[in-house]
Amino acid sequence: MWMLIAATLICSGLLGCESAWKKHHDSPRQLCLAVVDALNRKDIEKMNGLRIQREEYLAWVWPAFPASRPPSNFPGDFAWANLNKNCNIGMKKSMERYGGKNLTFVDIRFTKPTVSYDGFQLFRGTVLTLRNHDGKTVEPKILGAVIAKDNFYKFLSYKA
């Protein structure tokens, strides 16, 4: 009986992560348009919602990373705490520097090879190109990697 209840809770938790995941953007471009909108509106909550969340990270991202297994065997909660802390610092710095500046999305590109893991891909070396109110292009170093799962995209992190 207890096994059935535990299995049901685990499955419903994972399904909740999947449906929450699929509410997000279907291209890196759309993801970046959303982050630029969040910056322009000074909406840190929206910016936070564009990145991987704890449940998703612990359910399927962290277990796929080599550091989650021996010999490193780092606990997922430890990894999440570090990632979350750096993301929060990065979002705050990004808002302070670029929030409310009327930026326009120009381009996104990735300068490092994409890495495939079990169930998702990690796009690395994210370079965001924006146009400021003076018409000059800028490349703020605010975005970390982008995760793609089932053709939906989120940020893994923001740079601290």
Image (tube, rainbow, N blue to C red):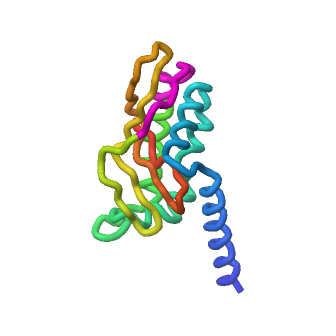
Image quadrant containing the N terminus:
bottom right
User: Is residue 135 shown in magenta?
Assistant: no
Q: Residue 83: give x, y in percent of width and height.
A: 44, 47
Is 100 colored magenta in this rendering?
Answer: yes
- Seen in the picture, residue 13 relative to 132 is either above or below; the reply is below
Residue 68, position in %: x, y?
38, 65
Residue farthest bottom in this picture: 1
144 or 8, which is in the foreground? 144
Q: Position of residue 146 (x, y in %)?
A: 44, 49
Which residue is located at x 31 percent, y 70 percent? Answer: 70
Residues rendered magenta in the picture? 93-108
Identify the residue at horizontal 42%, vertical 69% (top origin): 118
Residue displayed at 63% across by 72% down? 10
Q: Nearer the viewer, residue 62 or 112?
A: 112
Whether residue 10 sits left or right of residue 122 in the image: it is right
Above-or-below relation of 97 to 74: above
Would residue 70 be found to the left or right of residue 8 on screen? left
